[in-house]
Every structure is written in structure tokens, then in C-alpha cells.
Image (tube, rainbow, N blue to C red):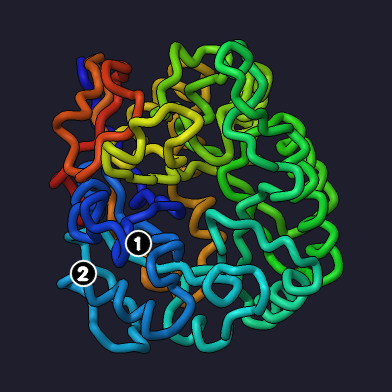
Amino acid sequence: MNKTLTFPGFIDVHVHFRDPGIPEAETTASGLEAARRGGFAAVVTMPNTTPACDSPEAIAYQLSQTPSLPHSPTPSLPHSPTPPLLLPSACITKGRLGHEVADLEALAEAGAAFFTDDGSYVADDKVMEEAMRRAAALGMCICEHAMDPKELGNGVIRDCDLARSFHLPIIPVSAETVAIRRDLAICRVTGCRLHIQHISTAEGVALVRDAQKEGLPVTAEATPHHLLLSCEEIPRDDANYKMAPPLGNNEDRAELRRAVKDGVLMFATDHAPHPAAKKALGFAGSANGIIGLEAAIPLTWATMVEGEGMSPDAWAQAWWKMPRGILSPRAAACLDDAQQTVVEVGEWRAIEIAKFASLSRNCPYNGFESNCWPVVGKGKGA
């Protein structure tokens, strides 16, 4: 017998809508529809658009693409249950180039949910320290794409049988851990809230665990794909398994699951749509990233609740309570406490990506089964 569970509205703090830039991959309208069907009450868009979201005008453009939201360059971000609430993040550095800190104060005033150069690591220590000091003064969180370019090199995949078979350049664990260690050191000095995006290694998780025990204001997120998949199980040279950071090995996956269950990590999708042509060149030549909004609830439930014994309430908190903690006070205040995510648990069925609302299809989830599905249109804002 199926049962219906109701939770506070889920928030995905890591989505890419490619608007402006690559509208054939995703528009704000199609992305918000994917989020609605996926069961989300709110999403935070990443600033790696073209041009980058590094100005109040760029934030205003993001909001102008949502008919139910205001077009003012300094919006109040009111709640609207349909479509899901859109909260733009803004760049840490101008143009996401890593050289000069953006006007964080103006971006905060314009309504930025947090600051990130997602897709790029802020490699200059002095620039990052300045950014974290200024963000701390604003009460804002810095979210970091923790992949050090010096360690990353030209790597495209973690060490595994497929990488060796196709002679693919390897991404070492140190690409993540060197970046996290640097950011934690600056966090200690500045007191700024720090969030590690899409963590992927057991070693990286250990650093976050230790930082939290130390009392540092540090959080991190795990994606459905890093929790579900392993580089050791990639079946072929298929770029639908290529993302940044890359899939870890079985040990990494197991530690990520333990950390989610322990409340160390929250969930986020890193929904990253691409046109088919950009994912057709194998690991060596294709773009990074996969879509995830419409599969996130069924996949994380099957993996963590059914597979790992996580309680439904703890699972839900990793989708709503923990994500709220990294939003700006202004953005968090816009969330409607009456808005709900409703799921139905019982019948096992397969994911069908052909039915997704997203304009892109770049993911390997087709056929994966779950017994938990969002109920769209049931409950306020669902």
C-alpha cells in the first residue's frame, strides 16, 4: 500500500539553467518546470552563465525570466508557489576569472542567495581571503567549487579500469583535498561561512567532518550521482558519467553515504544540462555535468532511505533544513513555511528520462528504480 509523506518545501541549492548563454540546453522556464516536477519548492541558480552573474543587473535578469517574480534590480524576492522560487547566486570574482573580488555588497543588496564561482576555483589565496572577509561582514556564505587547477591538470576522470583502458588523464584526490584545506585555513582566519560544493572523495569528507568538530562554520553537499554511482562501475566511454568533480571510487561513495546519514552533508543536484552534441565525444572531449532535478527525490530516497537505512525525516532535512542554512538571511526569509514537498512511497518504478521537462537528456539514470516519487500539485506549493 502506498503512503503519502509531507515535508517542508525542498530546496536545491545547486542548479544550472544556462540562461543567458545556452538556451537550447535549458531556459529558466524549462528549468523551473523540471524543478516543479521534481518536487522542489525553491532552487538556487549558479552564476556561470554568459555573461556571468556578477552584477545587480545580472541578478535582475535572472529574476526577470520568472513571470511570477519582480523585474526590479533590487527585488524583494517574494514567495510564489508556482513555479518554484528562484534564488540567484552571484559570483565571488568579477567574470568568475578569479582575479578581482566582485562587488559583493551590491550583489547582496540585489538579492544574491550566496557567493560562488561554481565551475571555477578561486585559486588566488589573497583574493579568496578578501572575499571571505567581505562575505563574513555581510553575513553571507561563500560556496566553493573545490578543485585546485594545479592539481587537476588536464584530468577528466578518477583512476579506474575505464581510465586505464582508454588512457584517459586522471584527476587525483588531491585536486579536491588541497582546495578544501586552503579554504578551511581561510575560514579559520575570517570566520566566514564556507560551503563545499559537490564533494566527491572520502578524504574530502574527512576534512569537512574534522572542521565541523572543530566548530568551524563549514557545510558541504553530496549530489545524487556521487551517492549512486562509482567510477569503478562506469560501463563504457560514455560522457553521461563525466562530471566535475568526477565520480569517486566505491570507498568514496560509501563514505559520502555515511556522511549524509550522519548529518555531515546535505543534498544538492548540480543539475547541469548540455545539448546532446556537447556530451557525444566521450570522456576526453565532452563537457562536464549531468541533469538531476527530476530524478533527485527518487534516487536519494532509494539510495539513502531504502539502501542505507536513513530515516525519512533525516533524509528530508538534508533537502530542506540544511540547505536553508547556507542561504543569505534575506533569501531564507523569502521561503514560505507553508510550502510543502509531498512524496508518495510504495510502488517501485523506473525513471524515464524521455518524459523529463528539462530540455536536455544528459544523464545515465534511465531505468534506475525507486519507490518514492514527488506528488506534484498536492499540498500548497508542491
Query: Label 2: which residue?
Result: 66
Figure check: 3 above or below 15:
above
Figure check: 44 above or below 271:
below
Q: Position of residue 112 (x, y in %)?
A: 46, 75
Give the secondary structure at mark 1. loop
Q: Which residue is depicted at the point 44% across and 50% down?
A: 320
Mark before the other along the chain sequence, 1 or 2: 2
Q: Quadrant of residue 319?
A: top left
Nearer the observer, 110 or 178: 178
The numbered dot on residue 20 is none
Q: Quadrant of residue 85?
A: bottom left
Q: Position of residue 98 (x, y in %)?
A: 65, 69
> Distance of mark 1 from mark 2, alpha carbons?
21 Å
Give the secondary structure at mark 2. loop
Question: Label 1: how many residues lie within 10 Å, few (<14), some (14-19) or many (20+)?
Answer: few
Question: Label 2: how many residues lie within 10 Å, few (<14), some (14-19) or many (20+)?
Answer: some
Residue type highlighted by circle 2: Thr
**Is 259 on the left-hand or right-hand side of 289?**
right
Q: Position of residue 254 (x, y in %)?
A: 63, 20
Q: Quadrant of the N terminus?
A: top left
Residue type highlighted by circle 1: Asp
**Is 358 on the left-hand or right-hand side of 363?**
left
